[in-house]
């Protein structure tokens, strides 16, 4: 059974930090590109950060560069998002995504999301 389970969300004051985790199971995690997305109320879901290949190259939304860091531990089947200097506008549901293209077929999995609320 394929699962992505996020944890680590919560309520934090502006300027604070949180570390999100996403534990994968049921598929070969190390072969997949992984990303974090977020969706605030009334807004479209947006890409926050991703590890886009096996070399570990990363990309970030401009709004989180130099504040957020994505990382993965393939031995633990887990992807992390370290969030520092949090702002109220970072408030959203954060979801992890794992995807892979193989022989023309895309494999694409989502977690259920974890709420991050930043108070001013």
Image (cartoon, helix red, strand yellow):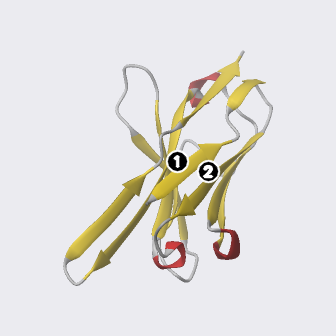
Residue with the mark numbered 1 = 62
Is residue 34 shown above or below 57? above
Residue occupying the point 34% across, 32% down: 44
Is residue 90 shown above or below 112? above
Q: Residue furthest front?
A: 1
Helix or strand or loop: what does disc 2 sit on? loop
Circle 1 residues within 10 Å: few <14, some 14–19, many ≥20: few
Circle 2 residues within 10 Å: few <14, some 14–19, many ≥20: few
Distance from the alpha carbon under mark 1 to that under mark 2: 5 Å
Q: Quadrant of residue 56?
A: bottom right
x and y percentages locating residue 112 in the rendered image: 47, 40
Residue occupying the point 36% across, 72% down: 100
Residue with the mark numbered 2 = 65
Horizontal arrangement in the rendering, residue 17 relative to residue 66 (left or right): right
x and y percentages locating residue 42 in the rendered image: 37, 20
Q: Quadrant of the N terminus?
A: bottom left
Give the number of marks. 2
x and y percentages locating residue 45 in the rendered image: 38, 37
Foreground residue among 107 and 86: 107
Horizontal arrangement in the rendering, residue 90 relative to residue 120 (left or right): left
Q: Which mark is residue 100?
A: none
């Amino acid at each position: 059974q394929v699962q992505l389970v996020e944890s680590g969300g919560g309520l934090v004051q502006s300027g604070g930090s949180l570390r999100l985790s996403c534990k994968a199971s049921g598929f070969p995690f190390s072969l997949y590109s992984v990303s974090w997305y977020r969706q605030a109320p009334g807004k479209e879901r947006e890409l926050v950060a991703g590890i886009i290949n096996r070399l570990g190259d990363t990309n970030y939304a401009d709004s989180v560069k130099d504040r957020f860091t994505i990382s993965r531990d393939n031995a633990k089947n887990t992807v992390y998002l370290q969030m520092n200097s949090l702002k109220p506008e970072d408030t959203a549901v954060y979801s992890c995504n794992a995807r892979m293209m193989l022989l023309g077929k895309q494999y694409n999995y989502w977690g259920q999301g974890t709420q991050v609320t930043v108070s001013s």
